[in-house]
Image (cartoon, rainbow, N blue to C red):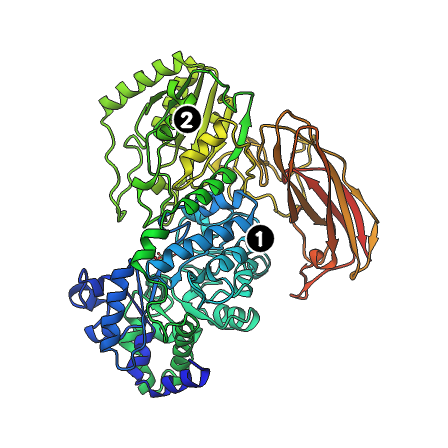
Amino acid sequence: MTEQKLQELLQDMTLEEKVNQMLQVAGGFFTGDMVAMGPMAEKGFTEDNVSKAGSVLGALGAGKLKKIQREFMEKHPHKIPLLFMLDVINGLKTVFPIPLGQGATFEPELSERCAQVAAKEAAVSGLHVTFSPMVDLVRDARWGRVMESTGEDPYMNCLFSEAMVKGYQGEDLREPYRVAACVKHFAGYGAPTAGRDYNTVELSRHTLKEFYLPSYKAGIDAGAAMVMTSFNTIDGVPATGNRWLMRDILRDEMGFDGVLISDWAAIEEIIYHGYCADRKEAAVRAVNAGVDIDMMTGIYSEHLCNLVRDGKVPEELVDEAVYRILALKNKLGLFENPYKDADEEKEKEVILCKEHRELAREAARKSFVLLKNEEVLPLKKGEKVAYIGPYVDNRNMMGSWSIVGDAKDVTTLKEAVLEREEGKTAMFGAGCALLGGEVKLEGFMESVEEEPSAEECAAMMEEAVKLAGEADTVVLALGEHRLQSGEATSNATIQIPKIQMELFRRVCEVNEKVAVVLFSGRPLDIREISRKAKAVLEVWMPGTEGARAIVDVLSGDYNPSGKLPMSFPYCVGQVPVHYNEYSTGRPHVEGKDKDRFRSKYLDIPNEPLYPFGYGLSYTRFAVSPAEIDKERMSGGEKLHVSVNVKNVGDVAGTETLQLYIHDIAASVVRPVKELKGFRKVTLEPGQEERVSFEIDGSMLRFLTENDRWESEPGEFEAFVGTDSSTVNCVKFWLD
Ligand code: BGC
């Protein structure tokens, strides 16, 4: 449809019809699971709203969605198709590692491919929009949603944000198998105070703009069709009613002209924040801020028409929002083909096909981070291995946002071991329950698996300890329950359940060679595990093919290459902890531990247990001192920092060289290090390669005292190493 036709359509719509476009309702209204009566009527929905609504969330399936669309359009006065949306986060039915795991690959192109596959499975199932990527910067592992982010680094998050948007959307949303991406949650949702979900966010405008906003901007620049508001306040004003944030920053500064959707019921929540007295005022605030779609409240439908009629809201604001919604439908080609790619035959052919599963296995393997290894891994041919722990025979490793992923499509670790010849001699035991009654997972929509009783657990543990005693090596598969990380799952202790720690201790008493395979949605406090186990492999929530990928790595068929996208704190008292912190007036200096008046703890180190960018391999790499080709550059020039990297171990492997820059003195203090580039190199034993990073003026820019992105003359340090703690450094001057 041409722009002119879209405008004509808009002009022809009644005010009620337009306001209904701004309403998003749950699929249950159309499938008969919900009616616009009872509690839903209290939320402000009427049958008329529902029959003319603009979009639907939470319904899935080609057949079902085609039927809903057909019946809906028959009744709709202007035959405007519905938009179908869902959270497709790390895959639809073929589930990839959680986004934090994807961050550990240091391979945004891989996430682009995963997003493309997710889009294909979603599109054939009838969906038009996914509420992904979540690009919130995260620094606090207590916040359960760190699992949905790609980590603590702004530069890396920008690359992943861009890659995922491209993967979902491609060049043109009308292309087959593409869905619109929704960058979320605008803005700063990843910084809730004390790591408690939905809590207040306290960020200076400088920190918000310089470190938190760029990843949203990267997604917008990549063409994201939609942005979602966040639940939190910014400067004391809820984001969903925040005119400055949504109009001045998102629309004017960032140039976003797509659809802005509220998060779930977020327009209503600005009342509970204490920002609006009632629903009418909330409608005014949100529409003034430029929120186009009201997700799952009836506030717009209840009040906007009267507000326009009473002259409290200009009709142009409604027109502006509705035009954007219609334009998105048009970009997806829905006016010509309201079913887009929905196709029952294709669903059967495409979903969980071999190619998709292979990509899931590749992504999982690359996401694993080897945190420690004292010659235990890879497992030796012929040795007797006991696989113990609640994750040995467990299919639930897709992460809490895999709302459509089906555990029956997942292979367990035990099955994956038994698929291999050498696995035939392996021994298996659960050893204990996952949660052991200590953590109560209540109020979740999905039911939580029943756990064995205390007596059964005791027997399981004895059996497992016996197996551990008989084995040459123990692979101990431990970790968080998949529902312990995700939305509304803040944790104050970030440790694995006590019962699993008891199993760990018992097993370590009878066998010295323990390799822990750690499942988690977030960095955990693993001091004791890291001290006692001989090897630790972090596998996050690895998805549908996670178990096969784990066996690939344990067996040595694949040499681990993942790097931490988020620091593993020494303990929870350190969080928020991130490598790119500022120096202080009294920095902690190595060797000066006895200086009293330094910025440090008395009882723990300043450094995290494992820093950002860290991860081992089955081989070792030697990195030469960094060299620089010239010591001065002007703004328009470039210089190069280079190292030689050599595989000095016995097997081929991949190392990720990381370039960090530090601006020594500036008008606004600079982080001690900032990632500005990285390169993955794969080397055979004995092979050496020169790796050069080009540094240009744009990489030295930051948000200066003028509130502009500029570079300032002066001295800089450039570090090249294999993690963020590197001291391999050269200096240069920007004139
Ligand atoms: C979450 C969003 C999600 C939405 C719809 C909200 O609770 O914060 O990330 O997209 O629900 O499912």
Q: Nearer the viewer, residue 177 or 212?
A: 177
Quadrant containing ligand 1: bottom left
Is residue 13 left or right of 559 when viewed as pictured? left
The crowd level at tag 2 (other Cα within 10 Å; few <14, some 14-19, many 20+) is few
Q: Position of residue 612 (x, y in %)?
A: 58, 41
Q: Which residue is drawn at the image coordinates 31% and 52% (left, top)?
A: 348
> Does label 1 or label 2 sit earlier along the sequence?
1
- Is residue 90 positioned above or below 380 on the image? below
What's the amino acid at mark 1? Answer: Pro
Residue at disc 2, secondary structure? loop
Q: Position of residue 71 (x, y in %)?
A: 22, 71
Q: Which residue is drawn at the image coordinates 43% and 56% (left, top)?
A: 200
Q: Which residue is drawn at the image coordinates 25% and 78% (left, top)?
A: 76
Q: Nearer the viewer, residue 315 or 221?
A: 221
Q: Position of residue 590 (x, y in %)?
A: 68, 33
What's the amino acid at mark 2? Answer: Arg
- Is residue 734 positioned above or below 606 on the image? below
Residue at disc 1, secondary structure? helix
Residue occupying the far left of the picture: 38
Q: Which residue is mark 1?
A: 154
Q: Which circle marks residue 420 in the picture?
A: 2
Q: Which residue is drawn at the image coordinates 76% and 46% (left, top)?
A: 641
